[in-house]
Amino acid sequence: MSSEEAVKTKPGLTVLDLVYISIGASLIAICSWISIPTTVPFTFQTFAVFFVLLLLGGERGTLATLVYILLGAVGVPVFAGFGGGVGILFGSTGGYIFGFLLIGLIYILFMRLFKKKTVVKVAALIIGLVVCYAFGTAWFMHVYVQNSGKVGLVTVLGWCVFPFIIPDFVKLALAVVIAKRIEPAIRVR
């Protein structure tokens, strides 16, 4: 077996994979800095998560999201408002950040189970977003109750989900259009 064959058959990430993952994590961080502060800040993070998954694929896109979260966990200011640290991850909005990983895992599952058509990709991202909303909302309610007292589900949905639905669908559509245009120009796959 030649060294070239050994490199091709050896499982794991290539240097190119690591570069793509790093660029993806950087893009998510940059998009999180584009922020309008509210109870849960309006950011372009979800656009970046969608875009990275669509362009890099499920595994690399999810790893890029994980790297982004780990960078924030160790204090690198990659979160909305140039925040960083475990305090943000375990704060009231941390569930939505962890929810980005769930979007990636659902995307991976769909790509393995179904054909990789655009409609399947979009369906996976929409279902992933709904799961992210549910996980993040449950997390928010738990943290809020611990720190501030009782709060109703409809109130929390009014703060954390309802205002984001239309903007997130616009971001999803934008990510699909841009990824479809960029993909042929670069060798990602």
Image (cartoon, rainbow, N blue to C red):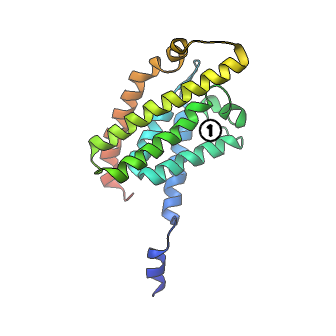
Side (left or right) of 53 relative to 184: right
Foreground residue, 35 or 88? 88
Locate the N terminus and report the quarter of the image it occupies.
bottom left
Residue 131 place in picture, x, y as percent? 47, 33
Foreground residue, 152 or 54? 152
186 up-or-down from 54: above or below: below
Q: Is residue 99 visible?
A: yes
User: In which quadrant of the rendered view does residue 165 lie?
Assistant: top left
79 up-or-down from 7: above or below: above
**Residue at the spot 50% in from the left edge and 48% down from the top edge:** 62
Residue 42 place in picture, x, y as percent? 52, 24
Which kind of residue does numbered mark 1 sit on?
Answer: Val
Residue annotated with mark 1:
78
Residue 83 place in picture, x, y as percent? 67, 32
User: In which quadrant of the rendered view does residue 50 lie?
Assistant: top left
Locate the C terminus and report the quarter of the image it occupies.
bottom left
Direction bottom: furthest residue:
1
141 up-or-down from 31: above or below: above
Instruction: State how many labels appear.
Output: 1
